[in-house]
Image (cartoon, rainbow, N blue to C red):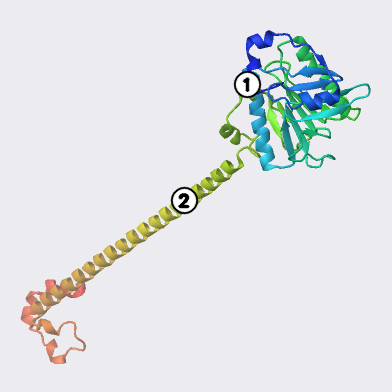
Amino acid sequence: MSLLPTPRESPKNLDRPQPSLSVTEAEYWEKYYGESEIIYEWNNGLLEEKPVSDYVNYLMFSWFVEILHQFLTVHPIAETTGLEIGFRLDLPHKTQIRRPDLGVILNDNPVALYPRDYNFDGVFDMCIEALSDSSEKEVERDTVTKKEEYASVGVKEFYILHDSQKIAFYRLNARKVYVPIKPVAGGVIKSKVLPGFQFRIKDLYQRPSLKNLAEDKVYQEFILPFYQEEKRKAQEEKRKAQEEKRARLKAERFAQKEAQRAEAAQTQATEEKKERQAAEDKIKRLEAELARLCGFPPAHFGKKPMPLLMWRLNWQVLHRAQPRWWFMARRL
């Protein structure tokens, strides 16, 4: 099925009958394979025009091609082709030339595809067809005929994309028969042909953006790797900035506590100095008072030893002031 917009997609062209034309294989390769406007396949001597898609299935197919391209950018293990590249199917009782909408050729495929090749001489490892349901015959061609043909020649995986219940995913078993690929948890299809390539079936219908897929665990291993790397670097820089901020705040709090501690120590030292000064002043006042009461010169108190003559007391004065003198002496 062609996904490229062409004039033949108009309703009047779609309604026009397309009779199969009988041509030889040589005539097909020479006259019809390289036709630019109409994509033809060769069905054992009959010329068949590939049917076209509606827009919603075009969008589904385009989304699938985009995520596959992202995967192969990160894991370059295969090449892809469009419907321009066909391959020859040597079946037991007939020969077909099919042109899948999307073909995948692994790097270890026995047959290589070269840049100047117009067709693939080997067998695709994976084929994807975007189903056209404009007629029952076209539906049967993709879902039945091509399914049998691709299995017979050894196409390992075959996907049929369509915005309906006709969507299907097959894998070749040991008996060369396609069996449905069972989705894992969350409705995820995992490819064995392309290890690591996976997608949710519902995402084919919803078509999330690549940026959203990059945040999704199903896709983040291969979607927008450069975006994810930049995001990782941004997160790492943010983490470092937060750590530096925490370290700076911790240092500021420590410095603030140290300043408070130093200020408290300074305040305590000042208070202690004031207390000592007050005590010394009080002692001086008491000494002066005692000297006045005893009749001694104040300057001699606090000096040791005192001259013996200084102990000649005026007993009369001492006797009158005895209670107060005795109290002051005990204070000293």
- The residue lying at 56 percent from left, 41 percent from top is 227
From the viewer's side, name the closer residue of 222 and 135: 135
Q: Which mark is residue 5?
A: 1
Point out the frontmost of discs 2 and 1.
1
Residue that numbered label 2 is attached to: 241
- The residue lying at 28 percent from left, 67 percent from top is 269
Other residues around mark 2 within 10 Å, as few (<14) / some (14–19) / many (≥20): few
Earlier along the polypeptide chain: callout 2 or callout 1? 1
Q: Which mark is residue 160?
A: none
**Residue 181 in view:** no
Toward which corner of the image does residue 178 lie, by quadrant?
Answer: top right
Local secondary structure at mark 1: loop
From the viewer's side, name the closer residue of 246 and 183: 183
Residue 248, position as x, y percentages in the image: 42, 55
Residue 235, position as x, y percentages in the image: 52, 45
Q: Give, as a three-letter code, the residue at label 2.
A: Ala
Horizontal relation, residue 44 to residue 49: left or right:
right
Circles 2 and 1 in contact, beta carbons < 8 Å: no
Residue 288, position as x, y percentages in the image: 11, 77
Toward which corner of the image does residue 46 lie, by quadrant?
Answer: top right
Toward which corner of the image does residue 16 lie, by quadrant?
Answer: top right
Total marks in image: 2
Local secondary structure at mark 2: helix
